[in-house]
Image (cartoon, rainbow, N blue to C red):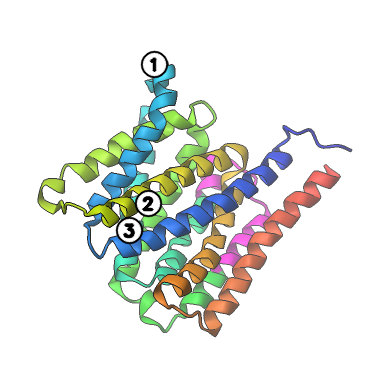
Amino acid sequence: MTVPSSSPMHDNIRGILWALISAALFATVAAMAKVAVTQYHVLQILFFRQAIVFLSSLPSITRNLPQSLKTQRPALHLLRLTGAFVALSASIWAVAVLPLTTAITLAFAQVFFVALLAMRFLGEPVGAHRLGAVAVGFIGVVVVMQPSVDGLINVYALIPLAGAVGAAFAVISVRTLSQTESTATLLLYQALFVGALAGIPLFWFWTTPDLPGLLLLLAMGILATMGQWVAVKALRLGEASVIGNIQYTQLIYAAILGYAMFGETPDSHTLLGAAIIIASALYIVHRETLKKRTG
């Protein structure tokens, strides 16, 4: 039996592919943030990032004014924007105080929270196979971290974990909002809200960038914007618990970038954990492929 191109199973496959691209973009931005945060405040980096998001959404917004600014779910927008601010701020702050791979690995707790929230608030069918894959992937994260290392008991480890909670609420909110509102509208509200929260305190924290610094900040904003557009597309197509699990692949990108840019060499625990995480993500893809063939 042929699966229609608009079927949920086919959409999940397409969503997974977009999620893989999104993961690569966000890992790259995290590595760039680790460089930028040595010169600029977290809020300044976040402000530049959101300014680019705002500019990218303007063409779509202006074509459909004032309808593009209307929403019937202001409370859900507020929840999503609060979660996004916490997640974005924490992601930049975390790479400043933790190794790149450690910060991204701890942020993977988002997948666990997304799966639980999707089951509770979205009513998504999170069956035994998918829950098992999420659990196995999270075990892989623990293996990478090693319970005895400082990363799990250091107070700084709470930063990416707090970001993971915020990101999970943002993901669940976007999954609902993206069914009725455009990507440009979603990104515009985020750019205005997060940009304002980051921009207001810059009177005290602003550092005028030189040309290389300006190019770095702008490049981060552009890549982050691309990542957000791609991530929203993935969430629009696939189920939140499926797409969230694919974000584990950021660990692979982070390991490569960590070695190339900062001389971080993964140890045996990192390699074993990465293998578990990859297996978890591939299992999700395999299950969706089987459903497509037999649906």
Residue shown at the point (27%, 51%) measured from the top left = 214
From the image, tell me which residue sits under label 2. Answer: 220
- In percent of width and height, residue 192 lies at 29, 34
Residues rendered magenta in the picture? 117-138
Task: Decide which of 35, 133 is in the foreground and name it.
Answer: 35
Distance Cα–Cα, label 2 vs label 3: 11 Å
Mark identifier at residue 92: 3
Distance Cα–Cα, label 2 vs label 1: 28 Å
| Residue 165 counted in the magenta span | no
Q: Amino acid at mark 2?
A: Met
Secondary element at tag 2? helix
Q: Amino acid at mark 1?
A: Leu
Distance Cα–Cα, label 3 vs label 1: 33 Å
Q: Residue furthest front?
A: 211
- In percent of width and height, residue 85 lies at 32, 46
> Which class describes the residues within 10 Å of circle 2: few (<14), some (14-19), or many (20+)?
many
